[in-house]
Image (cartoon, grey):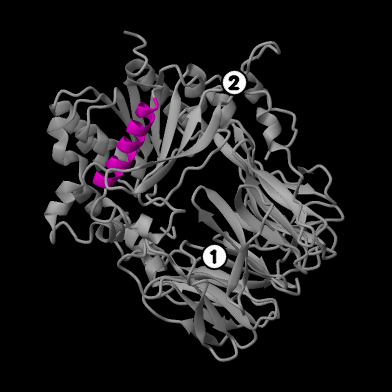
Amino acid sequence: MKFVYLPLIVSALVIFVTPYHSLDDPIYPTFEDIIALRSAGQPTISPDGRHVAFTMGTTDWENNRFDTEIWLSRDGESPFQLTQTNDGNSTNPQWSPDGRWLAFSADRGNKRQVFGLRMAGGEAQPLTNAPEGISDFEWSPDGSQIIYTMLEPQDSTLKDREEQLGAFSIEDTDYRMTHLWLVDVAPDRWPANQEVYCADDKDRCLKHPEPKQLTKGDSLTISGFSWSPDGKTIALVHREDPSIIAFMTSDITLLDVETGKQTPLVRQAGYEGGPVWSPDSQWIVYSSDAGNTTSNFYKNSQLMLYSVADGDSKRIAANFDENLNVTDWTERGLFATAWQKTERVLFNIDVQNNTMQQVEGTPRNVWSADFSKDGTKVVLRGMTPTTLNEIYVASMDDFRPTKISDMTAQIKDWKIGTSEVVSWNSKDGAEIEGVLFKPDDFDPEKKYPLLVVIHGGPTGIDYPVAIDGYVYPVNQWLAKGAVVLQPNYRGSAGYGEAFRSLNVRNLGVGDAWDVMSGVDHLVDQGFIDEERMGAMGWSQGGYISAFLTTNTDRFAAISVGAGISNWVTYYVNTDIHPFTRQYLEATPWEDMDIYLKTSPMTNIANASTPTLIQHGEFDRRVPIPNAYELFQGLQDNNVETELIVYKGFGHGISKPKERLAATKHNWEWFNQHVWKEGE
């Protein structure tokens, strides 16, 4: 779908779960070591380009949660922690236009609100008092106001219905919309004696300014917004309802801040969104599916340029064969990131001349970029194959990024193996790339077990990294003496629209060609032990793993994570029905043959590979009936199988202890069947 590390005193719990390593011994990271790694997140640079704030994620083992807080680097110096939200997260840092304040969102006991920190010092002050909590926010260009989105209160009729008839919902109808509000920013007001900020209406409360609701109605929900630099207009992104598939009804409207008048920017079928203003407020760049609602899951979106003066739109960067993610528009031009095979590249687009060029000298993979007000300074978040994500700053006049974080220091003494891009030809001649991980002491004359880890998506992508985690212990397998292949099968991002379309009406089948041809490519090089091979993946990778379970006996073991086992079962249960209709180009009732051809369950009688199944209890994206169907089918055919359900989770495992459990479950499964341990 269109769809970091800094030195800190380590908590006692992290010290407890991280084993002692002798200085004379190589350090092989444990599962806990990798889950506990600190990670650099969203960066933002001050308007004058002097300071950088960014988020950092840490692992709270005691409370079984991942925590996010904001860190600050002043004038390029070592960063320090700026926020601490107990039992919650501090996210979305945004500088005020004058650079005197840093706003962020956090839940500090009164639902999620916007807080402001004066850079000269002092405690964070609440800038909003939204009764339902805020979703997102943005400063006004003059810094005197903030706009924010808030979920509308529960309808009184629904409350009455529940009191009378109990709790139930009507599918595709019971929604709460999100609307846009505006509030004056008034921090540091001098209170009367004993007067303090508070959430209720006590007499001594220091009242927040009264917010103004900018959008209303039960036929649209706000999903994005962007305030013009001149402060006169807000570009609203809205859709019919908040369901995930309603993104295909997304349109853009221009809201006059003074009068409240709303003017449609574009109205057509398919997605329109992501508006970014030009510095002079005369142009807007936005992303569009150009009316496409039948293949937009895998085809390129279009980058459109809208003229505020005449209301016309035209396409730009039309010859670029990938999806562009616009990050900023400054006096130096429009900037966007995009995949180019396994690299995430930063581009500079000249919208008037409709030309673009790559910004040279960045890290290999750039995830985000934020610019100073005059466009002369930039902060990047990026990584290389031998580093973790780091925060870099650079001058656009002399582009030589300087690293201000030191996240990679966490792994500097670890034995982690190497990663490189490899390529091969699939059964139908398609060129496929993948990432090959090797142990540090790799010897091409030896025979190694092979573990194949298949990414989700299908428009995901794998790329060379130093540490690979989630629930598949790649680095530990390297230390154990295996090689790991991560194939970018047909459908993966980075290789153009035609490549992403290759698995249309060929799901599973073509994917299996790509995986198995990659396996054969490595076998032909002579360093793979064919008797000791395994495959695994999550989501779409889980589906491909399930397809391999019922269509080949080449693997000693397979693990299916949140995978699709039967496209009919998936289609009627998922929350993204159009996904199936687009990739198979039919509903089951129109073409059952294509559903049978591409479903793992069709060939369940041929299955023989020991298969571990992992699934979240409340997964809506790939609902759990898929897991039970595969589990029962394997049992009925006397195939060794085990189903592990992670209680309370959806499509992903988002807490550290359960992620540790899922990792150990995979480790034990493949140890048993690939390494024959415990026999």
Q: What segment carries the magenta color?
A: 508-525
Q: Is residue 514 highlighted in magenta? A: yes
Q: How many marks?
A: 2
Q: Is residue 450 visible?
A: yes
Relative placement, left or right, of 647 versus 339 is: left
Q: What secondary structure is marked by label 1? A: strand
Q: Please name the amino acid that badge 2 sits on.
A: Val
Q: As drawn, which residue projects farthest toward the top?
A: 679
Q: For residue 556, what is the image quadrant?
A: top left
For the N terminus, the quadrant is: bottom left
Residue hosting label 2: 17
Q: Is residue 459 left or right of residue 226?
A: left
User: Image quarter for residue 267?
Assistant: bottom left
Residue shown at the point (63%, 58%) measured from the top left: 113
Query: Residue 33's spot in the image, x, y percent?
Result: 59, 26
| Sequence-earlier tag: 1 or 2 | 2
Q: Secondary structure at mark 2?
A: helix
The residue tagged 1 is 150
Q: Position of residue 614 (x, y in %)?
A: 34, 33
* Of marks 1 and 2, the one in the foreground: 2
Residue displayed at 65% across by 12% down? 25
Assess disc 1: are there few (<14), some (14-19) or many (≥20) residues with their C-alpha within 10 Å of its C-alpha.
many
| Vertical comparison of 532 with 158: above or below | above
Quarter containing the C terminus: top left
| Amino acid at pointer 1 | Met
Res. 299 image quadrant: bottom left
Query: Quick one: label 2, few (<14), some, or many (20+) residues within 10 Å?
Result: some
Magenta span: chief secondary structure: helix
439 above or below 645?
A: above
Q: How far apart are the alpha carbons under marks 1 and 2? A: 40 Å
Seen from the viewer's position, the closer of residues 473 and 160 is 473
